[in-house]
Amino acid sequence: MSSTSRLTVLAGPTAVGKGTVAAWVREHHPDVWLSVSATTRKPRPTEVDGRHYHFVSNEEFGRMVDHDEFLEWATVHGRAQYGTPRGPVEAALAQGRPALLEIDLQGARQVRQTMPEALFVFLAPPSWDELVRRLVGRGTESAEEREVRLTTARAELAAAEEFDVTIVNDDVRRAADELVSLMRTPPQTKRD
Ligand code: 5GP
């Protein structure tokens, strides 16, 4: 693993806008390498295989777990499995590229065990009410699915203190720019 480049883990409660912030970074900061996770969940209509996720079967996901191909993996919201393929992350860091993982809290905790030198960033909503509004507004989940996600989100919000930095997602562009500028800060300035 290269010590000159930095891995950054972006986590936060469901519907806080992690995906939107990551999409902004992808669009506007091409020097940042974004990990593409594998997942067993079905694609949403706008999602492209290989770009937003690698959409895989349960069998394929299990095979990847068995072959230790994930840097971390988790079952999210008790439904689908998500994992970060290890090889591409290591290749990006070896090339000296700032690398970003947008993953859930369970995954962030796993990465902290194996790569404690990474920068851990918590994306927070401006308020709880705003988080609920965003989750309802997205309209991609059923009422039952939303309840599951809100339960997860309550626990996730309490985890902010485990992270090195909290960024409030009050505005996607501002939050993404703050994230990228943190990613470009030399590792030795990381808070202990
Ligand atoms: P969604 O289904 O809305 O795309 O994502 C659901 C949750 O899975 C989000 O909190 C997202 O951050 C998380 N997630 C996406 N990819 C990964 C991954 O590779 N590992 C883990 N642990 N969580 C992930």
Image (spheres, helix red, strand yellow):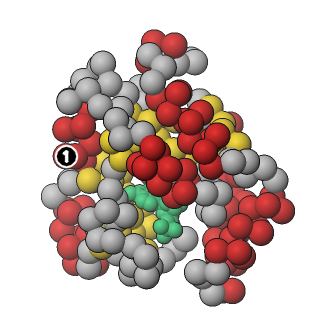
Tell me the residue that label 1 is attached to: 87
**Element type at marker 1?**
helix
Left or right placement of residue 147 versus residue 63 in this view:
right
Q: Is residue 40 above or below residue 189?
A: below
Categorize mark 1 by other alpha carbons within 10 Å: few (<14), some (14-19), many (20+).
few
Q: Residue 153 at x, y = what percent?
A: 67, 61
Under 8 Å from ligand 1: the CB of mark 1? no
- Residue 72 visible in the snapshot: yes
Q: Residue at x 63, y 63 (%)?
A: 15
Q: Residue 38 at x, y = what percent?
A: 31, 64
Q: Quadrant of residue 179?
A: top right
Q: Residue 84 at x, y = what percent?
A: 33, 54
Q: Nearer the viewer, residue 83 or 167?
A: 167
Q: Residue 53 at x, y = what percent?
A: 34, 65
Q: Quadrant of residue 16?
A: bottom right
The quarter of the rendered structure image containing the N terminus is top left
Left or right placement of residue 5 versus residue 190 in this view:
left
Q: Residue at x 28, y 78 (%)?
A: 58
Q: Quadrant of residue 90?
A: top left
Q: Nearer the viewer, residue 157 or 34?
A: 34
Q: Is residue 183 above or below residue 127?
A: above
Q: Nearer the viewer, residue 7 or 77?
A: 7
Q: Residue at x 51, y 44 (%)?
A: 10
- Residue 115 visible in the snapshot: no
Q: How many marks?
A: 1
Left or right placement of residue 66 versus residue 172 in this view:
left
The quarter of the rendered structure image containing the C terminus is top right
Callout 1, which amino acid?
Gly
Q: Residue at x 57, y 18 (%)?
A: 191
Q: Is residue 183 above or below residue 61?
A: above
